[in-house]
Image: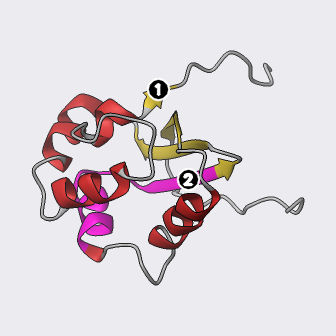
Amino acid sequence: MTEGTKVREYGRPVKRYVQTMELRDEPALIARYRRAHSREESWKEVRDGIRQVGILEMEVYLVGTRLVMIVETPLDFDWDKAMAELATLPRQEEWEAFVAQFQKCDATATSDEKWQMMERIFYLYD
């Protein structure tokens, strides 16, 4: 896929968070994880919860067993507060337990505990 992905325009400045996580190195599990995140199979309540806490866009990319998640939010977004709220919303705990079978992490970890925040170390300076 070399044509890139169109980025949503919000009409206002946003901030971006980038996180990473490893999946278990089992092709059948990775295929099931991909399907679980498809438009047809991802859980509506979880998508609604993500939007409810103020996230404008969330994308997950995969290469091998490595996941990278990009999250775009309003400038005044409070990550810690939003993740605490998200953990309490309908089906979120159930979703985390379901996807834990695919992920290299503690089965009881919350989403915020599983995903490791990445540090930006380069951008095209003006």
The relative height of residue 22 versus residue 3 in the rendered view (above or below) is above
Bounds of the magenta span?
A: 45-61
Residue 19: x and y in percent read: 50, 34
Residue 77: x and y in percent read: 31, 37
How busy is the neighbourhood of tag 2: few (under 14 within 10 Å), some, or many (20 plus)?
A: some
Q: Is residue 43 left or right of residue 108?
A: right
* Tag 2: amino acid: Val
- On whether residue 48 falls in the magenta region, the answer is yes
Q: Look at the image and name its color scheme.
A: secondary structure
Q: Quadrant of the C terminus?
A: top right
Instruction: Work out whether residue 20 or residue 72 is closer to the camera in this orientation and state it.
Output: 20
Q: Is residue 64 left or right of residue 79?
A: right
Q: Which residue appears at 80% of the width and 24% of the height?
A: 124
Q: Which mark is residue 60?
A: 2
* Tag 1: amino acid: Met
Residue wearing tag 1 = 117
Asked which quadrant contains residue 115, the reply is top left
Q: Which residue appears at 14% of the width and 45% of the height?
A: 85
Q: Is residue 99 visible?
A: yes
Residue 1: x and y in percent read: 85, 62
Q: Earlier in the sequence, mark 1 or mark 2?
A: 2
